[in-house]
Image (cartoon, helix red, strand yellow):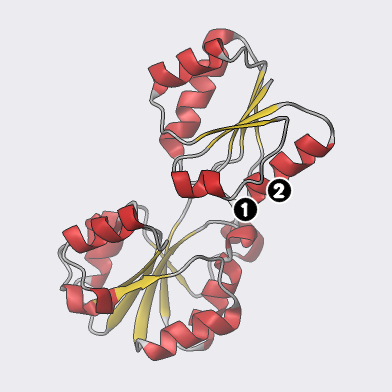
Amino acid sequence: MKLVFAGTKMGRQYVQQLLKCGEKVIVSTATEYGASLYEPHENLIINNKKMNYEEMLAFIQDKNIDEIIDTTHPYAVQVTENMIKCAKSLKIPYRVIERDSFIEKKGINGLILAHSYEEACNLLIEKEGNILLAIGSNNVQAFQKIPKNRIYIRVLPTSKVLEKCETLGFTPKNIIAMQGPFSYEMNRIIIQEHAIKYMVTKDSGTSGGVEEKIQSALDMGVEVVMIPRK
């Protein structure tokens, strides 16, 4: 039995390949929404609960997992570290299917690099103009020092995500709740509609829509602040 940690489109595609080859697979996602994107299959089991290291270790032992496959988002650092620790502890294979890096593919021309969300916040706090946070919902709290009326956040349209954003003080006017990835044209519409001057993004790889996101911003004169992978 293979255990695949998959919270991205690329991960779902990889799981489908395994199933077509006759493999029995357990998929672990961080959310119920991520789990709902999988079609039922006789060889597929879904786990939609987040697990810490101890829970992950017990789960792997209980399900007799013989290989751990990591197709998580490149910024899911803690989950990846726990997978590697479990694999070493139980002496089973660990394999990572990693998205390509935008920076490695395209370079950093036109980008402003910030090595943490806090650094990105500090770079933008004295600037003037609207900011688009295209980083998901996990780290929007790092931008609390910037006035909320300057920030537009693009996040998944789930109740938990929206509740978090509202708890942090963001109003519906500044929450763009949509599922990506987004096309070049859609990014341009969002930038124009909200008069965006700065965009904060991550190096999520081409399958995550980052190339279309960055190109649309640069073509419209928007300054792009990127959080590179560690």
Q: Can you say whether 100 is above or below 1 in the image? A: below
Considering depth in this image, is 1 or 109 the residue closer to the camera? 1
Considering depth in this image, is 23 or 193 the residue closer to the camera? 23
Residue type for callout 1: Lys
Q: Can you say whether 92 is above or below 98 in the image? A: above
Q: Is residue 57 left or right of residue 122?
A: right
Snapshot quadrant of residue 77: top left
Q: Which secondary structure lies at badge 2?
A: helix
Q: Is residue 218 left or right of residue 112?
A: right
Percent across and percent down for residue 165 are 25, 61
Circle 1 residues within 10 Å: few <14, some 14–19, many ≥20? some
What residue would you read off at disc 2?
13
Residue type for callout 2: Gln
Q: How many marks?
A: 2
Q: Are circles 1 and 2 on residues that touch, CB within 8 Å?
A: yes
Percent across and percent down for residue 36 are 54, 48
**Which residue reaches farthest right?**
21
Residue 9's disc number: 1
- Can the viewer see residue 73 in this picture? no
Snapshot quadrant of residue 204: bottom right
Considering depth in this image, is 56 or 95 the residue closer to the camera? 56
Q: Can you say whether 63 is above or below 189 in the image? A: above
